[in-house]
Image (cartoon, rainbow, N blue to C red):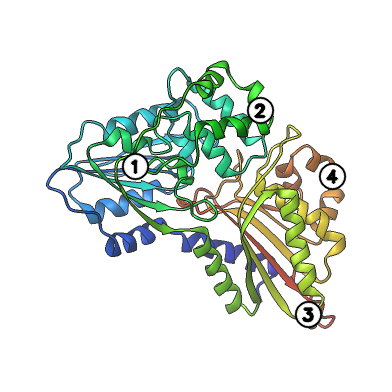
Amino acid sequence: MLTLRQTALDLFQQAIDRADPAVALANALETNPPKQTPGKTVVVALGKAAVPMMRQAMAILEPVERALVVTNAENHTEIPGARVLAGAHPVPDEHSLNAGRAMRDAVSGLRTADRIIALISGGGSALAVLPEPPIQLQDKAAVNAALLASGLSINEMNLIRQHMSQLKGGGLLRLASPAQITSYILSDVIGDDLRAIASGPTVAPIGSRAEAKQLMHTAGIWEQLPETVRDHFNAPELGEDLPDTAQCLVGSNRHSLDAVRTGATACGFDAQVVSDTLIGDVSDAATKIIEATKSAALSAEPGQKMAFIFGGETTVALNGTGKGGRNQELALRVARDGSDTLPGHWVFLSGGTDGRDGPTDAAGGIVDRHSWATIKKGKADPAALLANNDSYQALSRCSGLIKTGGTGTNVADVQIMLWQADEPTHSNPD
């Protein structure tokens, strides 16, 4: 009999498998094929799922005149006939700048008779950057660091990034004109707003430059930004129509949540997707997860098993200097708040489907009702570690880190709470 912990890990893997980018793209190319043109076929793939998407595209769309892949270092793999570059994530570096220049060059100089197939997945915002002059790479990196610590939502961060870039917010369309572009997009954002995925290189921006500037004021980061960035946002915005394009959504977080629900049901759990919009600060998210579990537990029968499934992308306000990510911090908060308040046996998992949570080698965290006490027994203060945003160290002391390695996909985060009512005649299932 599988433990709750192993079941949660298995279900998380099912969420990742459901987001397999090669399978999703193959289905989309069959049902929504790109328009045939008499000229060249150029394929560009950007994001954490870029490698498997490119492999699939080249097998189906051959011959391909030009192929460029930009992905993260963990997923970097050579592909015959394609140029594969690795950018940095979550903060861009020189590799990201080189990748941005390569993206520009790959789509430039084409004709109306040519076509571009753009394969877009999450993570592209940092993996390929091409700042609007006079903004420099170091300026963009400073802005990204400020955004990641600001508590702004992913959509709000992407709006700001779009207005500093020649690629984002439809920039790739402008660079590629007059060639025709068809985009196949694997969504890593809640609600599947195509403008926010990889900061929308082939769609219109989320909002105006003035709105982006106001967000930075509201978040309290405006004064700490480089002067070149503030000058750019103070300059007038030029209105410009974007070229026509076709878009196709090939996969999303909701598909993965439904796969978890199906898998949990097959394992005997009363399973439900509680929310596919778990956003906002991790402290609020932890409260929602615990309250949903407690509410259902009140009416549970002895031995009853329930699965509460969430999906989204939370944020963390950085107040310390520790190491971790939003999924690890969420797991640690649930361990703290649930250890004294949740009845029964339970295991909670929060993980990024890309296999990487923040600047760490972990995908997220997994905890149970004993985890908080286990950290204390290891002569560490979990409260102090949490206050310092040091969830990685805390979870490492209770076997709470999930390490999958790069998964080759990215459809945001998945949270799984498995709960079982007490049944004295059975052994501890944790």
Label 1 or label 2, whichever comes before in sequence order: 1
Q: CA distance from mark 1 to mark 3?
A: 52 Å
Q: CA distance from mark 4 to mark 2?
A: 28 Å
Residue 69 coordinates in the image, percent (x, y): 35, 41
Residue 341 coordinates in the image, percent (x, y): 86, 63
Say whether residue 385 is visible: yes
Label 1 or label 3, whichever comes before in sequence order: 1
Q: Quadrant of residue 94?
A: top left
Say whether residue 399 is visible: no
Residue 256 vertical placement versus 230 (above, below): below
Label 3 or label 2, whichever comes before in sequence order: 2
Label 1 or label 4, whichever comes before in sequence order: 1
Q: Amino acid at mark 4?
A: Ala
Mark 1 or 4, closer to the camera: 4
Label 4 or label 2, whichever comes before in sequence order: 2
Q: Are marks 1 and 3 in contact (CB under 8 Å)?
A: no
Residue depicted at 35% across the width and 28% down the height: 101
Q: Are marks 4 and 3 in contact (CB under 8 Å)?
A: no
The residue that label 1 is drawn on is 78
Name the disc covering residue 300, or none: 3
Mark 4 or 2, closer to the camera: 2
The residue that label 4 is drawn on is 383
Q: Secondary structure at mark 4?
A: helix
Residue 133 coordinates in the image, percent (x, y): 43, 19
How dense is the environment of label 1, judged by Cα within 10 Å: few (below 14), some, or many (20 and up)?
few
Q: Secondary structure at mark 3?
A: loop
Name the disc covering residue 221, or none: 2
Q: Nearer the viewer, residue 215 or 277?
A: 215
Mark 1 or 3, closer to the camera: 3
Residue 1 coordinates in the image, percent (x, y): 66, 77
Q: Quadrant of residue 295?
A: bottom right
Q: Secondary structure at mark 1?
A: loop
